[in-house]
Amino acid sequence: SDDAPLSDEASSSEEDSDEEEEEVKDASDGEGDSDSDDENFVAKMAAKMEQAGDVHSDNDSESSDDSSADSDDDSESDEKSLEQRPEESLPQAMDANVGFDWGSTIKPTKITKLAESSDDESTDSSSDSSGDESEDEDAGFKSSHKARKKAAAKRREEEEISRREAALADGTADENPETAADFERLVASNPNSSEVWIKFMAFHLSLADIDSARNVANRAFDRIEFRQEGEKLNVWTALLTLELKYGTDKSLQETIDRASQHNNPKQVYLRVCEMLDKAVEAASSSVGSGDLEATTKRADDMFKNMCKKFKSKKTVWIAHFNYLLKGSRHEEAHALLKRSLQSLPPYKHVETMSKFAQMEFELGSPERGRTIFNALLENNPKRMDLLFVNIDKEVKNGDIDKARALFDSVVNPVSNDRKQKFKFKDKQMKSLFKKWYRMEEEHGDETTRERVREEARNFVAKSKSGQHQS
């Protein structure tokens, strides 16, 4: 009874295999005109099916022999294995996914290629969609950022407008002008003020607009009244400074000539020489400046030209003395002093030499300054102003004893080596004792102050006795 189902199953498997062989034969008959590869494929498939039939028959015989010795449990397991074996053998027999080229590598079918291409397209579309989304997000962020910037700029502009309106309302805009309109309003309200015009010029220079600064200066010359010569000269000085810094030698000389036609020529040249003197100082103070030589030559030429044009004016010579002594050019300064005394009238010699002596105390040698003052005092014994200037320079230089010696030489001329006595009046002597006492209060002590008081009493007693004798 147990062998009956096994024989039925074996017969059914044989029938199935016969049917498969018939189908393969029919397929081979239908494809009689195919290539040799197809024939090989059919032959191999038939060989595989025969092997599968032998395996099934062997298994059937072994199962029938063992069924008598094994228990019912073994027969059930064999049935299960027999039921599973056809299922495992069928995929091996129908494994046709390799294609017809048996000697080369496996190629993907059209369906797999289409699947892969669809997968690639899906990934590309997903990446494109994500990229579009990120671009949209970036565009949205940029647009929002631009909107915020525009809003902030508009808010700042409104705040600036409100601030300017408040400044105009309370009058503070006139104190600190910031725009060209502010300066226009200021020059319209006060056209004779050189300070306003010069600030207007400086405003344009801060914007590197030199031509506009020149135009402002020319407007100032037309707007300022002709009686305001000092105000006009200030604007001319500002224009000369502009040409000196940003112009050429030709433009500077043309501006000097124009300014000389509308102002005192000596004052114009003095202003230009003063600016050149400051330029030389700036060039000498800056380390490694290569413009020192050129700037010095330019200043030397301008000073020489000024002294040549106005050789009878002591102020131009004094300005030239100051320039040379500040540059430690003492020999040139002394040679220039001799030339000035030859060109100046005699009544200007004392003042010129006094100025030169003061400059020697400040910029040169104090000893040379003392020598010049001694010569002046000997030749001018009645000039108490020269004596006071000499004393002030000694005090400023820190030589208090020399200043006391000068006072003592006037009060007690016998004890002094001077060849000529000072000839001062009693009123002048009173001012001399006052100056001496103020100096002792500042730099002396009680002993020196008592000595001044004693000298003043003696002088009064002598003057009274001299009046009685007369």
Image (cartoon, rainbow, N blue to C red):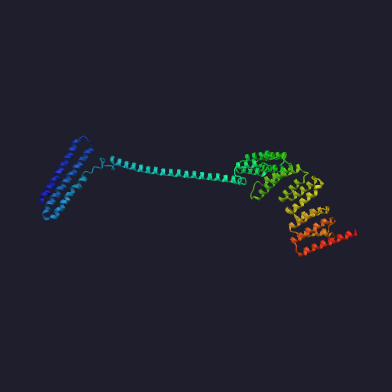
Which residue is the extreme one toward the front? 169
The residue drawn where x is 62% and y is 39% is 212
Which residue is the extreme one toward the bottom? 447
Question: Can the viewer see residue 109 in this picture?
Answer: no
- State which quarter of the image contains the C terminus: bottom right
x then y, percent, for residue 361: 75, 54
x then y, percent, for residue 457: 83, 62
| Total numbered labels placed on residues in the image | 0
Q: Which of 337 and 272 is in front in this view?
A: 272
Location of residue 313 (image quadrant): top right
Where is 385 relative to 264, above or below?
Answer: below
* Left or right: 62 in relation to 306: left
x then y, percent, for residue 6: 12, 49
Location of residue 417 (image quadrant): bottom right
* Left or right: 195 in relation to 126: right
x then y, percent, for residue 77: 16, 53
The residue drawn where x is 39% and y is 42% is 132
Location of residue 253 (image quadrant): top right
Question: Can the viewer see residue 119 in this picture?
Answer: yes
* Left or right: 299 in relation to 434: left
The residue drawn where x is 17% and y is 39% is 23
Which residue is the extreme one toward the top? 33
The residue drawn where x is 19% and y is 38% is 27
Which residue is the extreme one toward the right? 470
